[in-house]
Image: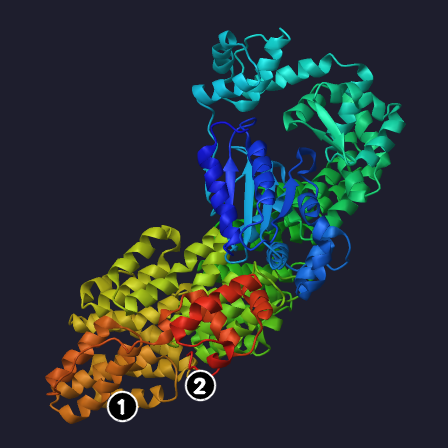
Amino acid sequence: MLYGRTTEQERLERLVAGARAGRSGALLVRGEAGIGKTALLDWLAGTAVRDDGEDGRPLRVLRVTGIEPEADLAFGGLVQLLWPVQDRLDALPGPQAAALRAVLGTGQERGPDRFLTGLAVLTVLADLADDGPVLCLVDDAQWLDQATAEALLFAARRLAAEGVAMVLAGRDDGFTAPGIPELRLNRLDFEDSSRLLAERGAAPALRSQIIAASAGNPLALIEFDSARREQQYQHDPLPVADRVLSGFRSQIGRLPERTRLMMLIAAAEARGDLPMLLRASELLGVDLGDLEEAERNGLLYVMDGIVTFRHPLIASATYQGAVLARRIAVHRALADAAEDPDCRARHLLAVANGPDQEIALELAAAAGRARDRTAYAAASGLYRHAARIAADHRQRAAWLTEAATLALAAGHTSQADRLAGEADELTDEPAVGARVASVRAAVAFELGDRREAARGLLARAGDTATAETAGLLRTAAAYGWLAGDGETVRAAAGRLAAGDCADPLVEGLERLCEDDAEHGLPLLARFLEGGLDASAGPGADGQAVRMLALTCGLVLGDDAAALELASAEVRRCRSEALIGELPYALDILTRVQLLTGHHRDAEAGVAEAEEIARGTGMRRRLARLGGVRARIAAIEGDARRVREIAEATPEALRTGVDCAHVLLDLGLGDFEAALTRLDPPPPGPDRYTWLSLSTAADQIEAAVRLGRPERAEEAMRHFEHWARAGAAAAPWAQAVVLRCRALLGDRPEDYTQALRLHEKGGRPFERARTELLYGEWLRRARRRNEARGVLRSALATFESLRAEPWMRRAAAELQATGEHRVSARMPADNPIDRLTPQELQVVRLAKDGSSSREIAAQLFLSPRTVEHHLYKAYPKLGVGSRQELVLLDLT
């Protein structure tokens, strides 16, 4: 019987009822030790199993409990959860199946992405739900190893329509799950505490004292009542949990020594594996019979080959109450008794208190296995422990460097920097030093200090490039460029050239830092000729250079090439399940889609990238994604939405939103704000970002509108210089240059030449702006018939893009030419506008013939969620099946 939990029980029942109805959900139950989290999960498991639901399908319960000593054991929790259902792995997509086989130790393949395991967990749960609703219970989540916690939370955040309910329980200060709804358990009030004590037969006269002492903590109520019965309770000023722990220690201390030793073996082993306990106990001269007294006192119980403590605090009291020498002896016996090498490594950790090369090698081997399963946090910890007891300082440096690299991969930036610093002090070997420098620079880059990252690499690389330092210099140039630090780019290029290691990418970036677009842009184009496969040079930081490779397409203004490169990278991330890399690739792809007028596609890509970034902790990437949404809102004239995005974006990452605001100001006729909102970037990398290039024409138009053409001269010179250098690849850019010239010089031939270039394709919004300005000029020149044609074309494009301020301007100009019945109107209702971004992605893939399982693998969803999106999309599109989708135009 649970007391005082009616509201909580009702909420959990609703969650399970939703799973029975095909809806999924997750909930985090949070509260202090002893508050009743496990009791609530036990109640839910029992209640849910007894009720088969209206369709008669039984509910399946999967359960895992975090174990404190296993918090550093890679995927220990996930093995516990999935071992009973490993027969389902054969039905998973190949990469997902390989990831889980590596976790379960039944496969050899190394996973390519640490988030792939979470996707595989989601797919397994969805597959199980095909047979009936699934309830996944996670107790003591604060003690899960990080790899398991990441996988479960990734799956929990993407649950939608599978028929899966996931309930996690954790202590107040030990587990966080952003994005998961929480249910906090409070202490019992006086009435419910009295009812609990009455059920236990506590004397009414003592109840008030017990309730006051326990402060309504259910475990404390029970334990303090038991202590009073045995006349062993004493008032203590310690916190309630500490008093309960102290009470358990006293109770354990009264047991026979052999019983205490057997309990210590069970507490140290932690998993309750009876065969292993018996092997270890034999080495220590005790046996199963020595647990009898502990069982009789209700401290633990043995059932189905598993030893379970009645409460985790009893295990803690057992372990903490033993002297160090006894704990070491127990762990040594457990290590000798272990049949699993990772389990053995965990116990060896507690044994080694000084240099021990043999144990260090075993820990390093366990770290390697954890790394191969993408359990990067666990692998980092094991390498760190191995380094701590390694006898050779060079080996220590190498293991610390690997620990730092893996800590960074796990998202622990400050820990990665600290470990790299320790390694740096131990070695002067160039190869190790290069890796250390790369880690420290990557930490600085991740924390937002790109300039520091670039200069740190430069300082480590030396004055002349060598085989070991060429990669550092290339990455330094990449970081420097992305930081707007031209000085570092130039220095890196000079040192590469001095070492006869010249690189077209770095040389091209150097030329652009000198405003030499004529020579710099062709070098970048040459770099991209081989596609993204060429982006990871020997020894280079592949991620940094890959980021720059994608950005180069935008810098060149070659939208077709940028679209091809970004699309290929997105496809690569999807096919190889590189969930962690996908948000950046989508970021670049959505920028190109925005520029080429595919706003719905861009919004869908941003929504997906934001969801992944939010679910995987990529906070800075999440903030940067607002720039695309802000520019679409600016084109549509939605000032409120632009303002909201700006307020939600950190100031240091607001450049994209600020550039969108310039376009909004221009569209709304606030030319003063458009001209003064952003200062023109100085010569160097910042001049060649897609944002600076996109904003130059806006500021030129604003300056002309204000009658201050001199304010446009610098922006015009730079933009013209850039467009001329990239003329063959970007006819749209030459067209915009001619439009700006026409504005400044009032020459109609520049407009007509610009429109001829626009006919080659490119950016429809820019073409419509050119048509609008030319139409205005023709109307002022009283060439009204000519003006109507280009203004109609401009209005049609603005309408298709929902560019309301620009629609109003074009409509007003048309009316001024004498055109009757002109009104700016939104485009006719397009069925795809009724779809959510994710529904749009799903129906397009379904239209192309992809199965639900294939779509799920590409979009990192479950097949059931894909089917749910199709079910919701069909009536919006006016169709009833996949076959009918083929007949629709979904562009």
The structure residue drawn at horizontal position 39% and vertical position 88%, both measured from the top left corner, is 760
- The answer to whether residue 326 is seen in the rendering is yes
Asked if labels 2 and 1 touch by Cβ distance under 8 angstroms, the answer is: no
Query: Where, quadrant-wise, is the N terminus in this rendering?
Result: top right
- The answer to whether residue 445 is seen in the rendering is no
In primary-sequence order, the first of circles 1 and 2 is: 2
Label 1 crowd bin: few (<14), some (14–19), many (20+), radius 10 Å? some
How far across and how far down the image is residue 171, in percent? Answer: 54, 33
Tell me the kind of residue under disc 2.
Ala
The structure residue drawn at horizontal position 16% and vertical position 84%, both measured from the top left corner, is 814
Q: Is residue 335 left or right of residue 414?
A: right
The structure residue drawn at horizontal position 50% and vertical position 10%, both measured from the top left corner, is 204
The structure residue drawn at horizontal position 57% and vertical position 64%, both measured from the top left corner, is 863
Secondary structure state at the residue bearing disc 1 = helix
Query: Where, quadrant-wise, is the C terminus in this rendering?
Result: bottom left
Q: Is residue 231 left or right of residue 804?
A: right
User: Where does label 1 land, which residue?
Assistant: 752
141 in relation to 595, above or below: above
Kindly report which numbered mark, 1 or 2, lies closer to the viewer in this rendering: 1
How far across and how far down the image is residue 477, in percent? Answer: 53, 62
Q: Which quarter of the picture shows residue 769?
A: bottom left
Q: Is residue 659 left or right of residue 38?
A: left
Decide which of 555, 846 is in the foreground and name it: 846
Secondary structure state at the residue bearing disc 2 = loop
Instruction: Specify the label residue 89 is tagged with.
Output: none
How far across and how far down the image is residue 86, in percent? Answer: 72, 54
User: Where does label 2 land, which residue?
Assistant: 728
Q: Which quarter of the picture shows residue 757?
A: bottom left
Tell me the kind of residue under disc 1.
Thr
